[in-house]
Image (tube, rainbow, N blue to C red):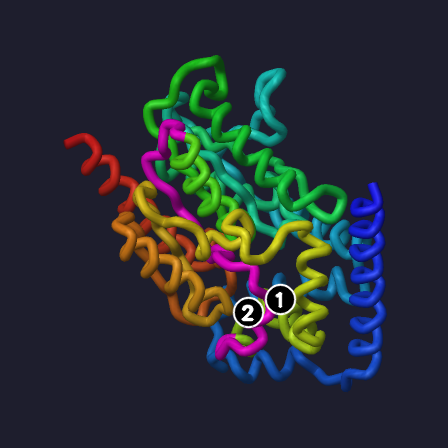
């Protein structure tokens, strides 16, 4: 009892200290125009499509500017969901049957119910939804003739980080035996996700292995977070060229490292060294064929390369494909960006190759 009270007091004291010091740091830091600095770092000649994408990314930062906590999360959620408002979707979206996990089925014409993809959206674990990522899930369903289940996992700060992981684990168990129309076993299963959802994807395939469950035929992670060690991101060479993550990381980099560490622990309620939060730090042997896409201009490039190298050294069939001068998770901007379409074509080639190999 005494230990529990002491731990509770220490946690709250740490949280208060983090908040106070962070407030002092941000009040004292010099005001500067980060936007102009970043634009000069990126290749000056930008196509009209890329300019539109950068405007949307800037709009995301503007929507949450000056907000904190739940207010910031709500603003980001509204903005990200609005990005799909004008999309012309080919696929049908459908809620799962009663008793299924929270989320939606995305089903393109001709999709086979026994071919299933579990999709885990990104959004820094505080934003994003099945709706915000319909550009990706619609394209994946059309590409693979598979029914995509986009899991609406629990987000922070209302919930624990681990709650979202539990939701993904339960959703995987569920899609093994449940299709969009009825209860039936799956013949072909893929786990995919982007950014924060890419982290959950990589953590999930290791958990599936450890649980002895039917493994997915493949995994796809788009610009995934592979390590939660925020203390190292501010030193990365791509800080100025990452239009999506750069502004936030620049602010975090100004917080003293011990406070940033404890702030991460208190916010996520899990140690950053835990493989569930940092898949790069886990056991990477005996994993399914895994494809990672990442931009050469984003902060997560180095860690993605490290993950693939470690997985390959452990004997797992992992591979990485990079694109120059793309924003974080540029796949969201299909069909506007030709490079997004190229990326989906590459995913299709990878999955076709995996299926052909497993059929032998």
**Which label number is shown at residue 51?**
2
What's the residue at 70%, 47% (across, down)? 156
Whole-percent x and y of residue 50?
51, 67
Residue range in magenta is 212-238
86 on left or right of 187: right
What's the residue at 38%, 43% (across, down)? 219
Q: Do tag 1 and tag 2 residues touch (Cβ < 8 Å)?
A: yes
Whole-percent x and y of residue 300?
48, 65
Q: CA distance from mark 1 to mark 2?
A: 6 Å
Local SS, label 2: helix
Whole-percent x and y of residue 353?
23, 42
What's the residue at 55%, 72% (across, down)? 232
Q: What residue is disc 1 on?
A: 55
Foreground residue among 149 and 99: 99
229 on left or right of 21: left
123 on left or right of 211: right
Query: Does 206 appear above or below 360?
Result: below
Residue 106 visible in this rendered orientation of the protein: no
What's the residue at 79%, 76% (across, down)? 26
Whole-percent x and y of residue 46?
48, 74
Query: Does 339 appear above or below 358?
Result: below
Query: Does 93 appear above or below 352?
Result: above
Residue sticking out furthest to the front = 2
Q: Is residue 25 magenta?
A: no
Few, some or many C-alpha atoms within 10 Å of disc 1 (few <14, some 14-19, many ≥20)?
Answer: few
Foreground residue among 182 and 267: 267
Q: Quadrant of the N terminus?
A: top right
Residue 230 visible in this rendered orientation of the protein: yes
User: Hey, which quadrant is residue 165 in on the image?
Assistant: top right
Local SS, label 1: helix
């Amino acid at each position: 009892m005494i230990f529990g009270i002491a731990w509770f007091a220490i946690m709250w004291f740490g949280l208060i200290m983090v908040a106070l010091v962070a407030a002092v740091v941000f009040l004292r830091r010099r005001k500067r125009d980060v936007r102009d600095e970043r634009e000069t770092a990126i290749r000056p000649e930008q196509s009209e499509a890329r300019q539109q994408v950068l405007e949307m990314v800037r709009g995301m930062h503007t929507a949450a500017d000056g907000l904190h906590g739940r207010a910031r999360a709500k603003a980001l959620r509204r903005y990200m969901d609005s990005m799909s408002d004008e999309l012309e979707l080919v696929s049908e979206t459908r809620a799962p049957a009663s008793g299924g996990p929270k989320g939606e089925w995305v089903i393109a014409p001709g999709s086979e119910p026994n071919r299933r993809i579990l999709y885990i959206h990104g959004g820094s674990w505080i934003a994003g939804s099945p709706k915000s990522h319909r550009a990706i899930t619609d394209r994946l369903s059309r590409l693979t003739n598979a029914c995509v289940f986009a899991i609406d996992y629990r987000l922070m700060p209302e919930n624990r980080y681990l709650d979202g992981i539990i939701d993904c684990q339960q959703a995987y168990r569920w899609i093994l035996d449940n299709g969009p129309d009825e209860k039936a076993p799956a013949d072909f299963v893929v786990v995919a996700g982007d950014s924060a959802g890419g982290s959950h994807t990589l953590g999930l395939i290791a958990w599936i292995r450890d649980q002895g469950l039917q493994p997915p035929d493949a995994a796809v992670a788009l610009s995934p977070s592979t390590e939660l060690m925020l203390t190292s991101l501010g030193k990365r060479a791509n800080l100025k060229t990452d239009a999506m993550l750069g502004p936030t990381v620049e602010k975090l980099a100004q917080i003293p490292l011990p406070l940033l560490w404890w702030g991460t622990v208190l916010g996520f309620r899990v140690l950053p060294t835990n493989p569930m939060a940092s898949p790069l730090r886990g056991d990477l042997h005996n994993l399914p064929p895994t494809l990672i896409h990442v931009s050469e201009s984003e902060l997560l490039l180095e860690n993605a390369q490290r993950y693939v190298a470690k997985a390959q050294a452990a004997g797992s069939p992992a591979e990485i494909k990079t694109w120059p001068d793309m924003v974080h998770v540029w796949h969201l901007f299909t069909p506007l960006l030709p490079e997004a379409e190229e990326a989906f074509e590459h995913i299709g080639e990878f999955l076709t190759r995996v299926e052909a190999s497993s059929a032998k």
